[in-house]
Amino acid sequence: MNTQRLSSEISALEKRYTVAWNDTMHGVELRDWRYPDGWTLQNREKWRQKSDTPPGPAYVAPLLVRIPKTYPHGQPYACLPRGLHYTKDRVEHVIDPKEATEQGEIPFSMADWPDNDWLLWCVHDLDWEPNSPEYTLPKFLQWMMASFSYPDKDRPLRYARTHG
């Protein structure tokens, strides 16, 4: 892992968000992420106790970015808190690690999923390029915001790029 690059990128995130390292999930937790219109955290008090999520409107909720041990060569993953719901339509891209395990369908990114309070957001069309200066955690979060804006689409990131 390139810890110098990771530290620099986390510092950039700290200028905009309340950030904490989550040892259990090996990732960066943004405790005050502002999800797009339609998302709401229904169990805020639980998350206030668990990860010090600040008070605020229902669309302000934690977001966890799991960092692979091979970062930046390995792509990060976005994780949503259990209890976050999209109120406008169906959501196509959330994978529940508990359900996936029970059904024997464990994606490689979930093989070491230690905390069932987080759900995996499935990302399509990212084509992570670790050597490109454009592929950073702040840029990853821009792509996730675009993806979260169209959770009912089959390929939300592609849809955001062509319609956003």
Image: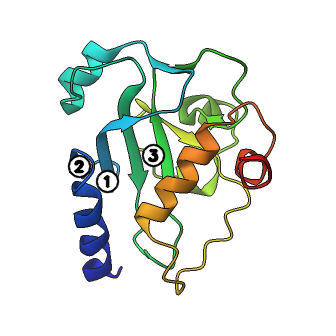
User: Gap between marks 1 and 2, in whole Å?
Assistant: 7 Å
Disc number for residue 113: 3
Q: The residue tagged with tag 2: helix, strand or loop?
A: strand
Q: Residue at 69% of width from left, 27% of height from top? A: 91
The crowding category of the residue bearing disc 2, from other C-alpha atoms within 10 Å (few below 14, some 14 to 19, many at least 20), is: many
Q: Amino acid at mark 3?
A: Trp
Disc number for residue 58: none
For the residues bearing labels 1 and 2, Cβ distance under 8 angstroms: yes
User: Gap between marks 3 and 1, in whole Å?
Assistant: 15 Å
* Mark found first going from the N terminus, 1 or 2: 2
Q: How many marks?
A: 3
Q: Amino acid at mark 2?
A: Val
Q: Give the residue pinned by disc 2.
A: 19
Residue 72 quadrant: bottom left
* Mark found first going from the N terminus, 2 or 3: 2
The crowding category of the residue bearing disc 1, from other C-alpha atoms within 10 Å (few below 14, some 14 to 19, many at least 20), is: many
Residue 26: x and y in percent read 33, 56
Q: Give the residue pinned by disc 1.
A: 28
Q: The residue tagged with tag 1: helix, strand or loop?
A: strand
Q: Amino acid at mark 1?
A: Val
Residue 86: x and y in percent read 59, 21
Between marks 3 and 1 in the image, the one whose residue lies nearer the viewer: 1
Above or below, 123 against 37 in this view is below
Is residue 155 shown left or right of residue 34? right
